[in-house]
Amino acid sequence: MLLKNLTSESLINTNQLFTSKEEVLRYLIKQLATEGKIQSEEDFYQTVMERESLSPTGFEGGVAIPHGKSSTVKEAAFAVATLQKPIGSWESVDPNNEVELVFLLAIPKSEEGSTHLSLLAELVTRLSNEEYKNRLIEAKNSQELYELLDAKQTETETITSPTIDKTVLAVTACPAGIAHTYMAADALVKAGRELGIQVYVEKQGANGIEDRHTKDLLQKADAIVYAVDVAVKDEERFNHLPKIKTSVASPLRDAKGILQQALKKAENHTKSEYVETDDISDSNEGKSIKTEIKDSLLTGISYIIPIIVAGGMTLAAAVFIAQAFGLQELYNQEGSWLWLLRQLGGTLLGQLMIPILAAYMAYSIADKPALGPGFAAGVAANLIGSGFLGGMLGGLLAGYFLKYLKQKVKPKGTFAGFVSFWFYPVIGTLVVGSIMLFVVGKPLAFLNTGLIEWLNGLSGANALILGAIIGAMVSFDLGGPVNKAAYTFCIGAMASGNIVPYAAFASVKMVSAFSVTGATILGKKYFTKQEQEIGKQTWLLGLAGITEGAIPFMINDPLRVIPSLIAGSAVTGAIVAYANIGLDVPGAGIFSLALLKGQPLLTAASIWLGAALVGAVISMVLLIVTRRNKLNKAGQKEA
């Protein structure tokens, strides 16, 4: 790729004096706008800053590559600046990085999977060459730097140790699959040259698997290094090798140390015979139980979010069509087109969501062999009516049981295929399924039944109390058995002619999602980048009446998050119930606005949605305050 084709001398700036990252970005964005590359400076600035909030764009050696993908970009381009005074406050993979060379990439939204990936990968590869990078930083003027962009690169001799007859394989992968993936790979290769060992790196990035390890390399290798922040694809290939697992950023700080650990492990652990099998080795070596469970949950949620969105919106569309056009009879007529649409959405939410959650939670812990038992655990959770929490429990049971099984029964020799394709899935399904059905099932069913009877006993009590209790239950476990108990009560009350409880239930379902989004925007500095990214999506799930988006927050800090969500939800439920607003159709989120009863439609809609917003504000404030207090206490302890 010729870098000159995507920039010009007028977009190159040398020896500039800036005091902050924001100042640099504003300046370069203005130049891009002047050159006609972007339509709106402010829109593109917001896009770039949103990307900055996700993960560091500063790397090491003085380099930063901020970038934005937006429809306001007319033509793919980049601007460059070298700085007189390095900026040490630029968030970077290397905490000690002081940025003095900045590439700002502007990419049209339509080219995010092509030009963006190619350009970023090319820049990362070139800037990993110290000589090339230093020549750019030392350029005296814009013309010189522009000419140096595509100047021929020479590899500097870095081998400082005699060649050792050792081969180390590596896999690098980051969530975005772009910059860190390639920079980590280059750092490992360079460190290998300095240590005198052969290092081959497979990049598992946004373009898929690049430089895939061959069968010959797999047989020859002495160890494998996983520098990854996501699950490794086709990890079973490395089953026979001693392994080291670390984050994708670690090689940027200490690639030599990582490779030396791999060599030491290779000396102390003899590799087994390479066998072509679909079994996957333990990918969670070195992780704490807490981290493993959290990663497992996040993996499961990432796989079910598309199912939740698709199912919720499809079901909501069927309900809305039935109400808006008076097609309730068609909606209930088995085999009709509207009934089928309703069944499609309902099946995605009611039948597929929990098994997929459980399966991919199990997969995160024990890889591919756990998928079958994980799906079985999810199906069992549906059968016993344990909902989201049952699926989570089933996923963990399947994952850890298969992890144990793989340690005790390893696929070897003639029976390798039998163990991988029959023993693991069948034994795993029978054991985990039996535990779910016959051990977990009765206690959860008893809990659900007791809660429903208790709620029925409150049906004649004060509406404020009933609404507050329903609200608290909805957000107590976000789709789990307590939530399902409230749902069952509201549906039963609706069937008996009491349509107020379900209206309260439907309004409260938006509270947790809205509050998480609000907290991660207004209290941004108190939440991690991952939490901020999740927060950007939960409001949309809330519009569809989906509470599960807030679960990662609940799992990470239940003692603070659960009371915060309950407080706002209880207020919302109390307001809706007190206003005597009803809902006689199982609606979904915002689509319920047109279906409300008990008050004039505009009044009912205003109170119902307003109550959800009031509750969300209360929960949002509590989420921010409790998180801030937690961080302050942690800071005081460290001090």
Image: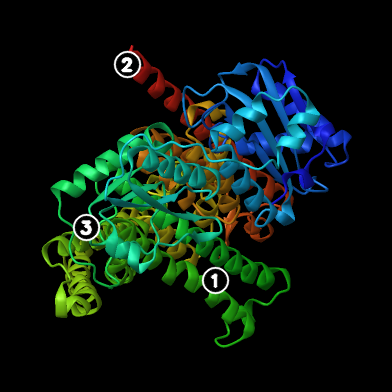
Residue 420 left/right relative to 94: left
Q: Compare marks 2 and 3 and give the one earlier in the sequence.
A: 3
The residue under label 2 is 638
Q: Residue at left 19%, top 61%? A: 401
Label 3: few (<14), some (14–19) or many (≥20) C-alpha neighbours in 10 Å: some
| Inter-mark Cα distance, 2 to 3 | 34 Å
Under mark 2, the amino acid is Glu
- For marks 2 and 1 on the same chain, the one whose residue lies earlier in the sequence: 1
Q: Where does residue 463 sit, x and y in percent of width and height?
A: 48, 45
Q: Nearer the viewer, residue 265 or 392?
A: 265
Numbered tag placed on residue 345 in the rendering: 1
574, above or below 601, in the image:
above
Residue at 57% x, 26% y is: 62
Q: Which mark is residue 423?
A: none
User: Residue at the top extreme?
Assistant: 639
Position in image of residue 161 (x %, y %): 32, 36
Give the distance between the C-alpha atoms of the residues marked 2 and 1, in whole angstroms: 50 Å
Q: Earlier in the sequence, mark 1 or mark 3?
A: 1
Q: Nearer the viewer, residue 586 or 121?
A: 121
User: Type of residue at label 3?
Assistant: Tyr
Residue type at mark 1? Gly
Image-based side of 262 in relation to 103, left or right: left
Horizontal arrangement in the rendering, residue 186 relative to residue 76 (left or right): left
Q: Which residue is mark 3?
A: 400
Between the C-alphas of marks 1 and 3, the distance is 32 Å
